[in-house]
Amino acid sequence: MTAPTERGAEVGRRIGVGLMYGLWRPRVLGGWRVPATGPVILAVNHSHNVDGPMVIGVAPRASHFLVKKEAFVGPLGPFMRATGQLEVDRSTADRTAITRALEVLAAGGVLGIFPEGTRGDGDFAALRAGLAYFAVRSGAPIVPVAVLGSTERPGRLIKALPALRSRIDVVFGDPFEAGDGSGRRTRKALDEATERIQKQLTAHLENARRLTGR
């Protein structure tokens, strides 16, 4: 498996821009909040298949998302790898995926994570510890991202996708640090970081809903 490249991720971003704006009507709010340089973790709520491609397309920087290995099937697999996305086996502690993700951050890149682990209500109610681990281990700030409108049903032509030309809001929040500044990486420190992260992400989602009326 080849390592993800920044060039590949930028190609993916440019393809994503065309697809997302061609198929839907994204409205991006707060994109300027994403730091222009240095390592960053995008923490995205996840309620629909289009959430990842949408953020990849509209984010101001090229990003590498951790994506379940089941999505890397058929011709989509080589394409996703070529555009810098990271395959992860959710059934185990995937050391290869963890190493690749940390390498992205060590190189000053952008790592995209769905902290809920899988599609759900998209409300950040159940967070896994992976986000806290990457944030504490790398020291990278977290930028919360709320994708709203991707689950609306009226006018949907394809069941697995939002209605074509419907508006989807992508709201970027202020970056924040997950750790307490001590540099601790113990289980207790990660649990405390997860609690801090959940409060920040939930508050951002509530603010994004007020802002967009979703």
Image (cartoon, rainbow, N blue to C red):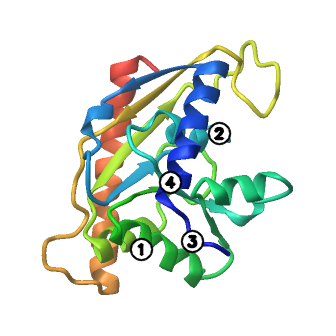
**Mark 3 to mark 2: distance in Å?**
27 Å
Q: Earlier in the sequence, mark 3 or mark 2?
A: 3
- Residue at (22%, 83%) from the top-left corner? 184
Where residue 149 sits: x, y (%)? 56, 25
The amino acid type, in three-letter code, at marker 1 is Leu
- Residue at (41%, 25%) from the top-left corner? 28
Whether residue 150 is visible: no
Q: Are marks 3 and 4 in contact (CB under 8 Å)?
A: no
Residue with the mark numbered 1: 102
**Mark 4 to mark 1: distance in Å?**
18 Å
- Residue at (43%, 38%) from the top-left corner? 59
Residue with the mark numbered 4: 7
Q: Earlier in the sequence, mark 1 or mark 3?
A: 3
Residue with the mark numbered 3: 3
Where residue 192 sits: x, y (%)? 28, 71
In the displayed structure image, the side of residue 80 where residue 59 appears, left or right: left
Where residue 96 sits: x, y (%)? 58, 81
Say which element carries label 1. helix
Say which element carries label 2. loop
Foreground: disc 3 or disc 4: 4
Residue placed furthest toward the front:
7
Residue with the mark numbered 2: 48
Q: Residues within 10 Å of mark 3 (few under 14, many from 20)?
A: few
In the displayed structure image, the side of residue 100 where residue 70 appears, left or right: right
Whether residue 213 is visible: yes
